[in-house]
Amino acid sequence: MADDLIQEVADEERLLRLRAVALRLGGALVAVLVLAGVAGGIWGWQEHRLHVAQAQASGRYFEAIRLLGGVDGSPPATGETRQKATSILDELAQSAPQGVRGYAAMYLAELKTQDHDGQTALKLWQQVADDKGSDGSLRMMAQYRILNARMGTAPKDELRRGYQALVQAGGSWAPLAKEGLAVLALSGDVTPAERADARKLLLEIQTSPDSTDDLRRRAGMLLETLGDAG
């Protein structure tokens, strides 16, 4: 009987331990579910706030575009109106959510080029080019503008690598980058090899389905300077 009693006690202790573990697991499960619910609520609220912020930023962006005018045939804004629009774009370029931030920076850079402030424009283009959250096409546009702006001041090898990277990316930026490579090849003291490379690139631009009519026209003009038009 002693053995039976010992066994009963052992069984009871085991049941008590199992019950305690079950209670602890149950509490932990409840805690996990509560935390998951809280995290889900926070995530949903953050998404809501992001959408609201993007909508507000987009509204301010289009307000700046409207203030600048010149889009629907109206004369471009000047004076205080232009300054107000520039201030809005400057703020958005620094603090707007991803997406709007890049477009604001690109538009502001164009205004800076009109004001002959090339250094600020370069910084804005570089900001967009380095922003991994920006649209891919927008980043390539920024890289293209940087290369064009530095033509004649940056080392030719550095510019060549930049244009070649855009060519390799493909799409509509490839013909524009090839134009940059052709102009680069024809700058300074031109070797026969560089002349041949430029001619090859210009012919590729003329036959590329991604080239615009203006781009093909410019390629034809450059070919004329080489005596290769037609």
Image (cartoon, rainbow, N blue to C red):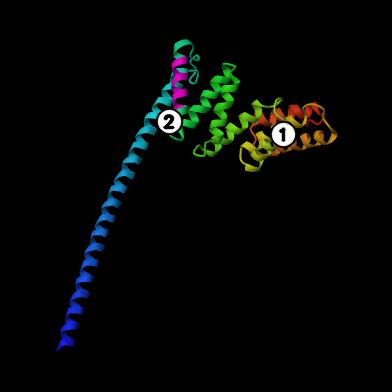
Residue 148 relative to residue 74: left or right? right
Question: Residue 207's x, y, as percent?
Answer: 70, 38
Task: Give SS at disc 2.
Answer: loop
Specify start and end residues of the magenta stretch as a single range: 82-92
Residue that appears at 31% across and 41% down: 45
The residue tagged 2 is 96
Q: Is there CB contact under 8 Å for labels 2 and 1?
A: no
Residue 173 relative to residue 99: left or right? right
Amino acid type of the residue tagged 2 in the rendering:
Ala
The residue tagged 1 is 181
Mark 2 packing: few (<14 Cα in 10 Å), some, or many (20+)?
many
Residue that appears at 29% across and 51% down: 35
Question: Residue 57's x, y, as percent?
Answer: 40, 29
Measured along the vertical axis of the image, is residue 1 above or below residue 26? below
- Outermost residue, right side: 192
Residue that appears at 61% across and 40% down: 171
Measured along the vertical axis of the image, is residue 217 above or below residue 10? above
Q: Nearer the viewer, residue 76 or 208?
A: 76
Quadrant (top left/top right/bottom left/bottom right) for the C terminus? top right
Q: Mark 2 or 1 closer to N-term?
A: 2
Question: Residue 136's x, y, as percent?
Answer: 54, 39
Measured along the vertical axis of the image, is residue 219 above or below residue 70? below
Quadrant (top left/top right/bottom left/bottom right) for the N terminus? bottom left
Residue that appears at 54% across and 31% down: 127
